[in-house]
Image (cartoon, grey):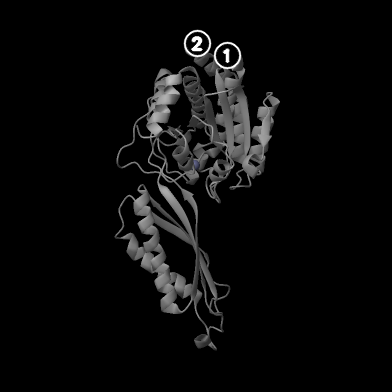
Amino acid sequence: MDVAALKHRVVERVDARAGELDRLALAIHAKPELAFEERFAADALVSYLAGEGAEVRRRAGGLDTAFVAEVGAGKPLVAILGEYDALPGVGHACGHNLMGTAAAGAFLALRDVAGELRGRVRVVGCPAEERGNGKVGLIKAGVFADVDAALMYHPGDRDEIDPLMLAMVTLEVEFLGKAAHAAAEPHDGVNALDALLLGWNALSALRLVVRSDSRIHGIITDGGKAANIIPDRAAARLMVRSPDNAYLADLRQRVLACFEGAALATGCELRHEWKDVCEVVRTNRPLAEAFVANAVSLGRTLHTRRPSDTHGSTDMGNVTSLVPGIHPFLSITEGPVPGHSVAFAAAAAEPRALETMHLAAKLLAMTALDVLADPTLARRAREAHAGR
Ligand SMILES: [Zn+2]
């Protein structure tokens, strides 16, 4: 494999498809779909891949909107991942319309040079990043079990190779009380909403004394049915995050205690469920160095994170716990624009975002070529993953 010549060719192949990739990204942007409901986006990506001759397996891992396609044979095996779900109310405010498309562009470029590849590339269409941890379902189905390197980029408002993505767990709480006429016989009721608010206030007090790198936030999903009925049910969904797995385990107990105390105080029954565990993203150093070197060769400099740089959480963390991987951010904006905002959703359809998507497709393909061409890179990535 002449890796320099192949990199040159995959760059040309991404450029050759730029117009089609743009149309795909804009079409997905115009039809935002929530987690597990990304039928239009998955159909559009699968149709495009299949139209270019790829054999695509749909419903990977039993997830309706997941897909997988492969090129090459044997090892090493590089996975290129893409997401395509949106957020309620604000659409593609995380820029995922640019991610599945970049992954498809990178995969097809590599497929164009398939005759000269040693090893395999797998593109993985990953549903439900914003809620529900689609990648965990794919992990359980074994989609990443034999992978040597997992590569994904994320649109952002700065170029950052090793973002701090926090460990996170979702908590569903439900208080059950007793309904009664709120004016005639309030003494016959047990107020589930008051129990929830009591727990919420305890949580607000807790927030003042937790580590500043940790986060607790949520919404009330049920606050009762009518103002003249004592609510017999109230519910909330919370997210608890920390960069430290041990501290997160401690926080979980303290958060739950807020609601247990409220249940005791009000006489309500408390039910709860912990779910959707995201792990911290582990940036694999040898893979990150390859990605950064490729970016530099195309005129883009990626920075390492500063202590003040914060992001959310992602199920890509679970993938990088399992196998060597990277999750760099590439800026699609001129200056700082907060993620999950209306402004970021608008930016995700701008020419600058599309140009960055082309760059991302090139860098993913080039870094995949590095892994396929250099057996020592896969070995070093594995060793770094094992902490050696
Ligand atoms: Zn995202």
Q: Is residue 230 above or below residue 288?
A: below
Q: Which residue is mark 2?
A: 2
Residue at 54% x, 30% y is 79
- Please give left or right for residue 326 compared with residue 83 in the image: left
Residue at 54% x, 23% y is 75
Where residue 292 sits: x, y (%)?
Answer: 40, 25
Q: Is residue 71 above or below residue 344?
A: above
Q: Is residue 198 above or below residue 352?
A: below
Give the residue type at disc 2.
Answer: Asp
Q: Are marks 1 and 2 in contact (CB under 8 Å)?
A: yes
Where residue 322 sits: x, y (%)?
Answer: 47, 39
Number of dots carrying numbers: 2
Residue at 37% x, 49% y is 245
Q: Is residue 223 among the parts visible in the rendering?
A: no
Give the residue type at disc 1.
Answer: Glu
Q: Which residue is mark 1?
A: 116
The span from disc 1 to disc 2 (Cα, nearest Å) is 9 Å
Q: Nearer the viewer, residue 315 or 297?
A: 315
Pointer 2 local density, CA inside 10 Å: few below 14, some 14–19, many at least 20: few
Which type of secondary structure does the marked residue at label 2 adopt? loop
Where residue 59 sits: x, y (%)?
Answer: 66, 40
Q: Nearer the viewer, residue 117 or 162?
A: 117
- Mark toward the start of the polypeptide (1 vs 2): 2
Where residue 332 sits: x, y (%)?
Answer: 46, 33
Q: Is residue 262 among the parts visible in the rendering?
A: yes
Q: Nearer the viewer, residue 319 or 133?
A: 319
